[in-house]
Amino acid sequence: QQQVKQSPQSLIVQKGGISIINCAYENTAFDYFPWYQQFPGKGPALLIAIRPDVSEKKEGRFTISFNKSAKQFSLHIMDSQPGDSATYFCAARGGSSNTGKLIFGQGTTLQVKP
Amino acid sequence: DAGITQSPRHKVTETGTPVTLRCHQTENHRYMYWYRQDPGHGLRLIHYSYGVKDTDKGEVSDGYSVSRSKTEDFLLTLESATSSQTSVYFCAISGTMGSSQPQHFGDGTRLSIL
């Protein structure tokens, strides 16, 4: 299975709160899991990424948690700010024909209220 | 920002007409990708290129063709546009297929087919 399932579809968080977005996959051959952030009118931009041999990666307020046995990974945004309001996509790369192609989740629209 | 220019940025056309979208890069990257973005579907790969004149299909390639005659240009053509091809189209580039050089995206072309 090449799908990546992302939830929730939308999320509203108060300023200073924690935003959590979850993704699940089926293909155990996936070997790279990036998260992209997209602002209106712009293309997605790489936010943070993880490989399956690591359970957690942190960059500033952004953390990826990876559960290989459950085939799930999540993005945590600590101390969420109004400037974090954007659409977030998880993705996975690899599989039976590794040509660098990414499979994207459906996206999560995050709104951080002041 | 990665040197990626998509043109046009917006286009409105009629069903049955041919449409060509252009992606131009100044990074001399080997890999180039075309995605479409639709609500509830995330980004889906249409076609990709792994070198000049080397292209392959993605998951939603029906109704689309591509060409790459120069490293810097990757063209996406809708031979006979249909309303189902109304979408936002993104081009992405990567120096390698590995995670050391992730995909960078352009700012998209919004295409409306009436």
Image (spheres, grey):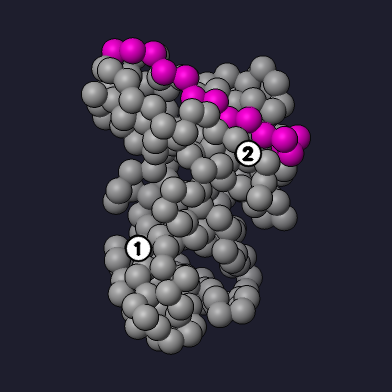
Q: Is residue B23 magenta?
A: yes
Against B38, residue B23 (above or below) is above
Q: Give the secondary structure at mark 2.
A: strand
Q: Amino acid at mark 2?
A: Ile
Against A101, residue A12 (above or below) is below
Residue A92 visible? The answer is no
Residue hosting label 2: B4
Against A46, residue B69 (above or below) is above
Report the magenta residues as a range. Answer: B16-29
**Quarter occupied by residue B28:** top right
Where is residue A111 shown, x and y percent of the image? 35, 70
Where is residue B63 shown, x and y percent of the image? 37, 21
Q: Give the secondary structure at mark 1.
A: strand
- Residue at the spot 55% in from the left edge and 55% down from the top edge: A45
Chain of the residue on which disc 2 is drawn: B
- Residue at the spot 43% in from the left edge and 87% down from the top edge: A16
Q: Which mark is residue A109?
A: 1
Q: Is residue A85 left or right of residue B81?
A: right
Q: Amino acid at mark 1?
A: Thr
The residue at the far front in this view is A114
Quadrant containing the C terminus of chain B in the rendered view: top left
Chain of the residue on which disc 1 is drawn: A
- Residue at the spot 62% in from the left edge and 76% down from the top edge: A59
State the residue in front, A111 or B50: A111
Where is residue B108 shown, x and y percent of the image? 48, 39
Question: Pointer 2: residues within 10 angstroms few (<14), some, or many (20+)?
Answer: many
Against B106, residue A9 (above or below) is below
Q: Is residue B82 left or right of residue B79?
A: left
Question: Pointer 1: residues within 10 angstroms few (<14), some, or many (20+)?
Answer: some
